[in-house]
Image (tube, grey):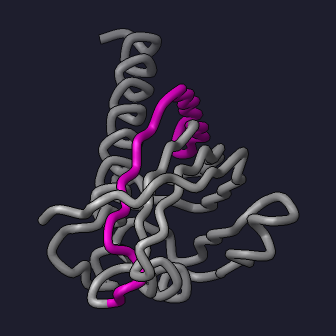
Amino acid sequence: MNEALLQRLATLEGESAVRRLMARYMDLCDVPRAPTHVSELAELFCVDAIWEGVGRETAQTFGQHRGREAVAAFVGGYLPPSDHFQLNLHYLTSESILVDGETAQGQWIMQQISTYADQRSELFGTRLNIDFRCVDGVWLIAHFRTQRLFNTELSTLEARA
């Protein structure tokens, strides 16, 4: 196989791995589902990962978390057995993934529908900008940035298990 073909194959495999990684992350963050163990989330992040809210409102709400364990604990704190969400579903659209060797950058628009323990429901539109690294053959999240573009209250949704 020639070098150009091998590079194209590596790029496609990287894109596919990043897509699967994001699907796994979103699945772990959806509610209802079986309780997510924090270690399942931690496995998705680099040791020196950063997870942060970008933009005034999102930064104030979520702040910045550094390191695999801190990121996993932060995200996991919203998930069962916490009763924060009664329903929390994520939909990714407008995907753009650029792979450059052992690193990649991805951007998505995420729609999120949430119903909270107090029965309030909201719809969010968020831009995700995420950096990835391939570490020992495994693609991981290196820097997760979320920026709220809009949110609106919804009439109460009923979560069904």
Quarter location, residue 79: bottom left
Left or right of 64 in this view: 7: left
Say which residue appears at 63% left-offset and 47% top-offset: 126
Q: Residue most toward the front?
A: 155
- Image location of residue 99, percent across then percent down: 54, 32
Say which residue appears at 60% left-offset and 76% top-offset: 48
Q: Residue most toward the right?
A: 56
Query: Residue 97: within the magenta?
Result: yes
**Quadrant location of the C terminus?**
bottom left
In the depicted view, which residue is nearer to us: 112 or 144? 112
- Image location of residue 83, percent across then percent down: 35, 87
- Image location of residue 103, percent across then percent down: 56, 45
| Vertical position of residue 45 compared to residue 135: above or below | below
In the depicted view, which residue is nearer to us: 7 or 123? 123
The chief SS type of the magenta part is strand
**Stretch in magenta:** 82-108
Q: How many marks?
A: 0
| Vertical position of residue 14 compared to residue 37: above or below | above
In the depicted view, which residue is nearer to us: 152 or 83? 152
Say which residue appears at 40% left-offset and 36% top-offset: 14
Say which residue appears at 70% left-offset and 46% top-offset: 150
Quarter location, residue 31: bottom left
Query: Residue 99: within the magenta?
Result: yes
| Vertical position of residue 94 compared to residue 109: above or below | above
| Vertical position of residue 110 compared to residue 114: above or below | above
In the depicted view, which residue is nearer to us: 98 or 28? 28
**Quadrant location of the N terminus?**
top left
- Image location of residue 137, percent across then percent down: 34, 53
Left or right of 30 in this view: 92: right
